[in-house]
């Protein structure tokens, strides 16, 4: 468990303790800003190689579109889980209405939202 307020040294300490155990499958469920720092330290500690599996939950995976390419590069080889939302007429129509309403209320914000984010 890594606190949102964790320092880089605390993250590095957690990474070092992960290296000391035999488990090599890690599930990451945290904010993008903290995940970037975690993956930076994991890369520095060479814990992102072939012997480790990193899985991000949908809370992080859904936000990949908002991340900078250099941040995404840190996650090379990470598996992301994202829920599947079937494309039905009802879902498509709801999303269309939502985007229209959002644009009316917030014309200066580009609403790049998918059905699984609602």
Image (tube, rainbow, N blue to C red):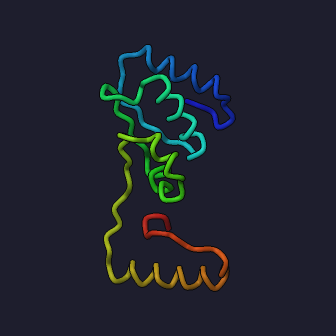
Extreme-front residue of the structure? 70
Seen in the picture, residue 91 relative to 72 is either above or below; the reply is: below
Total numbered labels? 0
Seen in the picture, residue 85 relative to 26 is either above or below; the reply is: below
User: Relative to residue 99, is residue 51 drawn left or right?
Assistant: left
The residue depicted at 60 percent of the width and 44 percent of the height is 33
The residue depicted at 55 percent of the width and 22 percent of the height is 14
Residue 96 percent across, percent down from the top left: 47, 83
Seen in the picture, residue 29 relative to 40 is either above or below; the reply is: below
Seen in the picture, residue 61 relative to 3 is either above or below; the reply is: below
Q: Using the rendered view, name the quadrant where residue 50 is placed.
A: top left
Q: Nearer the viewer, residue 87 or 103?
A: 103
Residue 55 percent across, percent down from the top left: 39, 40
Q: Nearer the viewer, residue 86 or 99?
A: 99
Residue 65 percent across, percent down from the top left: 48, 59
The residue depicted at 50 percent of the width and 68 percent of the height is 118
Residue 69 percent across, percent down from the top left: 49, 51
User: Relative to residue 4, is residue 61 drawn left or right?
Assistant: left
Q: Using the rendered view, name the quadrant where residue 34 is placed.
A: top right
Q: Nearer the viewer, residue 111 or 68?
A: 68
The residue depicted at 56 percent of the width and 73 percent of the height is 111
Q: Nearer the viewer, residue 40 or 104?
A: 40
Rendered-image quadrant of the N terminus: top right
């Amino acid at each position: 468990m890594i606190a949102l307020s964790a320092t880089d040294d605390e993250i590095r300490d957690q990474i070092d303790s992960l290296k000391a155990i035999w488990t090599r499958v890690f599930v990451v469920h945290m904010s993008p800003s903290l995940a970037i720092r975690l993956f930076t330290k994991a890369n520095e500690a060479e814990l992102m190689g072939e012997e480790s599996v990193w899985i991000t939950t949908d809370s992080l995976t859904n936000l990949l579109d908002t991340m900078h390419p250099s941040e995404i590069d840190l996650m090379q080889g990470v598996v992301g889980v994202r829920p599947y939302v079937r494309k039905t007429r009802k879902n498509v129509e709801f999303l269309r209405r939502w985007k229209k309403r959002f644009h009316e209320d917030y014309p200066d914000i580009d609403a790049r939202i998918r059905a699984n984010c609602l």
